[in-house]
């Protein structure tokens, strides 16, 4: 156990970050009344201690109500303690990832945040205002922006860290690419839901036997008509929905695929063991969807980056001047890219990006690209990396090139492995952490999530040499 002085210090830090005025008041009261106030304040306000940080009761209460509302909306009846345990697990993982971001010195400037918000709004066909309001009606714009920034950092740290754990062999890519090419224009889609009973990274025989028993109980319960979401909630360590929706055959985890291919809608199958635990799968439906032809774009671009001393307005003005010179014939697009573009990788090739599918680019860039006609140059386009002029040189629907199918195969395999590895990675964070649950409701209910491995917890830099602005493994960097 940590001393109350340390916990009091952690509490002051947390409150200072979230509620500056309240933190100042806490400091005054602490100075006036000493450790007696600190002890009472910690017990009243802290739901859990996570390494050098804390989770507040207010956070846990809000997260619990959010989960209960989500379950209620789907018709699942989940009791408050189950939702509260799941909420705390999620908040603990969130806190641990944010601690990695802090250790690594990860920062998001206001300019980057604005650009990321705009890209998120474009991807989700909404507005930045609606995204910020989705964080709750009681938050100010500044508080909602801070929440969005935390979500962005968590996603970036998670993705860059897990990406280092994934190794895809050329044989895997070639095998799947050939299968995709031979499949033709239709692919089966499976609507499935799953329950995962988690295992630790090094389970004892007793733990493995317990989890096997719980998996069989879950299997029988669902086969007898129990709601999958209600069963899954008992074991959930994150907010991931039990219902995985329709997944293409290529996205189904390989250990489950043979059984799913032989199952009929309504069947409940398993248990299956993976590196993260035991799985029960329910198959709701099978459909066959047309495979979208792979359209590729041969594009070139000129990038002008912005900074604190080089504004958006200045970048746009410079690109308009460059575009004017290109339109007058004073300089070619390729010559301008070599002379002015701040994307060194493509600048030496006259801005050429080669043939590629649009969705590997930044969303704003991709949208502008797909709206161009062959031979057309865009107006200045803003992305997460700066401002661009884009020239569309050619398009083609690629039905035969194995290289294109290899690119798609690589993306499919990555996403399939990522979805499993991210759970293992988050589990390892929790297993290496110091976690002490204080929340009275969970403690009195016998819920134990405590870990005392602080000495083992080494938060390593992500070493993401591709930068910090990547949105997904499929995003192509333009800087």
Image (cartoon, grey):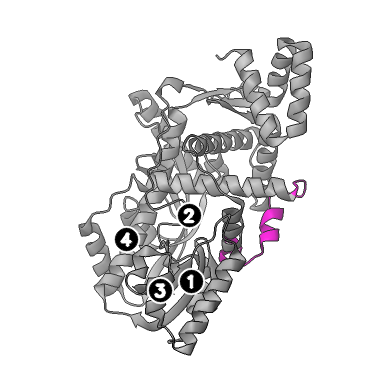
Crowding around mark 1 (Cα neighbors within 10 Å: few <14, some 14 to 19, many 20+) is some
Contact check, label 1 and label 4, Cβ < 8 Å: no
Q: Which residue is mark 4?
A: 410
> Where is residue 183, by image quadrant?
bottom left
Residue 119: give x, y in percent of width and height.
56, 62
Crowding around mark 3 (Cα neighbors within 10 Å: few <14, some 14 to 19, many 20+) is many
**Quick check: is 188 in the magenta stretch?**
no
Q: CA distance from mark 2 to mark 3?
A: 22 Å
Q: CA distance from mark 1 to mark 3?
A: 19 Å
Crowding around mark 4 (Cα neighbors within 10 Å: few <14, some 14 to 19, many 20+) is many
Q: Is residue 223 visible?
A: no
Report the residue at 33% width, 44% height from top: 165
Q: CA distance from mark 4 to mark 2?
A: 21 Å
Q: Which mark is residue 337?
A: 3
Which circle's residue, 2 or 1, is located before the other in the chain? 1
Residue 364: give x, y in percent of width and height.
53, 68
Q: Is residue 18 visible?
A: yes
Report the residue at 58% width, 59% height from top: 115
Kindly state the secondary structure of the residue where label 4 is placed.
helix
Point out the frontmost of discs 4 and 3: 3
Which circle's residue, 1 or 4, is located before the other in the chain? 1
Point out the frontmost of discs 1 and 4: 1
* Magenta stretch, residue numbers: 120-140
From this view, report whether residue 152 is shown above or below residue 63.
Answer: below
Q: Is residue 23 left or right of residue 102?
A: right
Q: CA distance from mark 4 to mark 3?
A: 30 Å
Q: Which residue is mark 1?
A: 366
Q: Which mark is residue 469?
A: 2
> Where is residue 80, by image quadrant?
top right
From this view, report whether residue 424 is shown above or below residue 338.
Answer: above
């Amino acid at each position: 156990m940590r001393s109350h002085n340390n916990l009091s210090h952690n509490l002051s830090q947390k409150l200072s970050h979230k509620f500056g005025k309240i933190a100042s008041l806490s400091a005054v009261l602490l100075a006036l009344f000493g450790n007696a106030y600190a002890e009472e304040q910690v017990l009243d306000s802290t739901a859990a201690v996570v390494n050098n940080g804390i989770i507040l009761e207010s956070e846990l209460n809000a997260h619990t109500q959010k989960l209960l509302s989500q379950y209620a909306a789907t018709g699942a009846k989940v009791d408050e303690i189950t939702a509260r345990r799941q909420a705390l697990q999620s908040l603990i993982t969130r806190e641990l990832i944010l601690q990695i971001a802090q250790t690594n010195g990860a920062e998001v400037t206001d300019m980057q945040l604005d650009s990321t918000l705009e890209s998120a709004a474009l991807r989700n066909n909404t507005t930045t205002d609606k995204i910020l309001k989705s964080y709750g009606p009681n938050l100010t714009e500044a508080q909602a922006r801070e929440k969005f920034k935390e979500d962005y950092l968590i996603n970036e740290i998670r993705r860059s860290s897990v990406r280092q754990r994934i190794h895809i062999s050329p044989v895997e890519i070639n095998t799947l690419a050939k299968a995709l090419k031979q499949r033709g224009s239709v692919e089966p889609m499976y609507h499935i839901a799953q329950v995962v009973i988690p295992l630790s990274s090094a389970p004892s025989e007793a733990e493995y036997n317990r989890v096997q028993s719980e998996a069989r109980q879950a299997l029988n319960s669902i086969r007898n008509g129990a709601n999958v979401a209600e069963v899954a909630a008992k074991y959930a360590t994150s907010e991931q929905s039990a219902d995985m929706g329709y997944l293409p055959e290529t996205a189904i985890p390989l250990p489950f695929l043979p059984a799913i291919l032989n199952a009929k809608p309504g069947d409940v199958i398993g248990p299956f063991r993976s590196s993260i635990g035991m799985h029960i799968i329910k198959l709701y439906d099978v459909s066959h969807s047309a495979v979208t032809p792979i359209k590729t774009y041969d594009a070139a671009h000129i990038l002008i980056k912005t900074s604190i001393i080089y504004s958006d307005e200045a970048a746009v003005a410079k690109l308009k001047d460059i575009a004017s010179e290109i339109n007058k014939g004073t300089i070619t697009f390729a010559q301008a890219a070599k002379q002015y573009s701040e994307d060194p990788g493509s600048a030496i090739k006259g801005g050429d990006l080669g043939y590629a599918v649009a969705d590997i680019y930044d969303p704003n860039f991709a949208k502008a690209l797909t709206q161009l006609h062959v031979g057309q140059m865009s107006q200045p386009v803003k992305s997460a990396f700066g401002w661009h002029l884009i020239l569309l040189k050619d398009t083609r629907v690629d039905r035969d090139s194995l290289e294109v199918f290899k690119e798609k195969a690589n993306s499919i395999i990555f996403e399939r492995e990522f979805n499993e590895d991210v759970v293992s990675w988050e589990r390892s964070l929790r297993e290496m952490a110091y976690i002490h649950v204080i929340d009275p409701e969970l403690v009195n209910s016998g819920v134990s999530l405590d870990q005392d491995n602080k000495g083992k917890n080494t938060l390593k830099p992500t070493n993401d040499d591709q930068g910090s602005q990547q949105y997904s493994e499929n995003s192509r960097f333009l800087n």
